[in-house]
Amino acid sequence: MSYSLSDLDNVTRQITSMERPKKPKMLVVDDEPDNLDLLYRTFRRDFRVYKADSGVNALDVLQAEGEVAVIISDQRMPEMKGTEFLSKTVPDFPDTVRIILTGFTDVEDLVEAINSGQVYKYITKPWDPNELKEVVDRAADTYKILKERTEELHRAQEQATLLEAIATVASTHSSIEDCLEPLAKAFGESFMADGCSFHALEAESLTVSGSYSKGGDIPLTLEGDSLVQSALSAGKTEVWVNDNRSEPPSEAYTNAGVQVHLVLPLIFRDRTLALLSLQWTQSPKPNEEEIKLIHLASQQAILALVAVSSNG
């Protein structure tokens, strides 16, 4: 299958256009209401700020809201010190950047927390608002860099796992029909799609298929789907995105809650061997790097199908 960079750019623009930039999340923790409100007011314009008046309640907030970019916590609080609370957040949220506010010289606790990587910086109370803003800005930048590196590592691992799965399919199955379901499962899981299907083609018509689903009413039935017909006719990747401006190709999209449908014809020497369909409802939509990886992996899937058909 051949594709151009302009095709990929177009698909990426369509998918990412529905994602609005979001403010980074911050959690502020202090048992003194005035300090808590001041921290909230200081950062609410640049962050989505969550508040907690104790370490115990802060852990509940994190459990409900998930990872935040920055945590600012007071050190001296009833029940649980700030450093103790922050240490409990490290296993689940290693990339979160943690800042301690202290009005006391708890040197031993702070040094231990900083050396163990649990605390990025400590600020003495009463704090200077400008200084605290500068520290938080650097902390947010640090979090962004850490997340980018983590995502790069994840993508590399994801790519290796997917390509290995495709190679395994080619070496352990004797017909194209037998390959379709394991390929759908490998692609669906790798790209966190809510539904994925591989369809073999004969005389440019969909025949047998294999599918993967997290549950619900997907993957969609593709017979008569206008997006699929467009992809097969043009011989290129097509995508439908629920941007509230374009009508879905069929009522099934609305019923299943599909937000993104990506369709790739798998072409070898001007012959369409199969069709790959990836569908997302509630799961995170693919970003630019993942879209490129989908196309790379589809090339490997083509080679796998060719190898199987030759052996058969």
Image (spheres, rainbow, N blue to C red):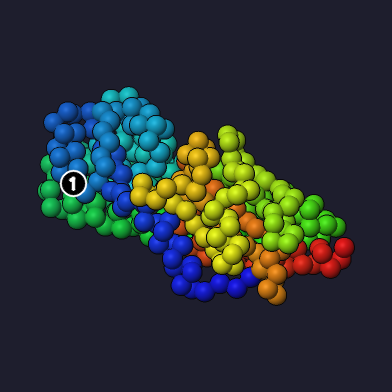
For the C terminus, which image quadrant?
Answer: bottom right
Residue drawn where x is 18% and y is 50% of the image: 132
Q: Residue 209 placed where, x, y %? A: 72, 49
Is 296 situated left or right of 35 in this image?
Answer: right
Q: Using a 10 Å C-alpha cutoff, classify the residue at mark 1 as few (fewer than 14 neighbours), some (14 to 19) or many (20 or more).
A: few
Between 120 and 1, the one lying in front of the other is 1
Residue found at the very far top of the displayed protein = 79
The quadrant of the rendering that contains the N terminus is bottom right
Residue sitting nearer the eye, 46 or 79:
46
Residue at disc 1, secondary structure: loop
The picture places residue 254, in percent across and down from the top left corner, at 47, 39
Q: Which residue occupies the foreground of this view, 294 or 146? A: 294
Whether residue 245 is situated above or below residue 160 in the rendered picture? above
* Residue at x 53% of width, y 40% of height: 252
* Residue identified by numbered label 1: 45
Residue 183, image x and y in percent?
A: 70, 53
Camera-side residue of 110 and 245: 245
Is 47 positioned to the left or the right of 65 in the image?
A: left
Three-letter code for the amino acid on which mark 1 is drawn: Arg
Q: Quadrant of residue 93?
A: top left
- Does any portion of residue 190 appear in the rendered image? no
- Say which residue appears at 67% left-offset and 46% top-offset: 211
Residue 273 seen from this side: yes
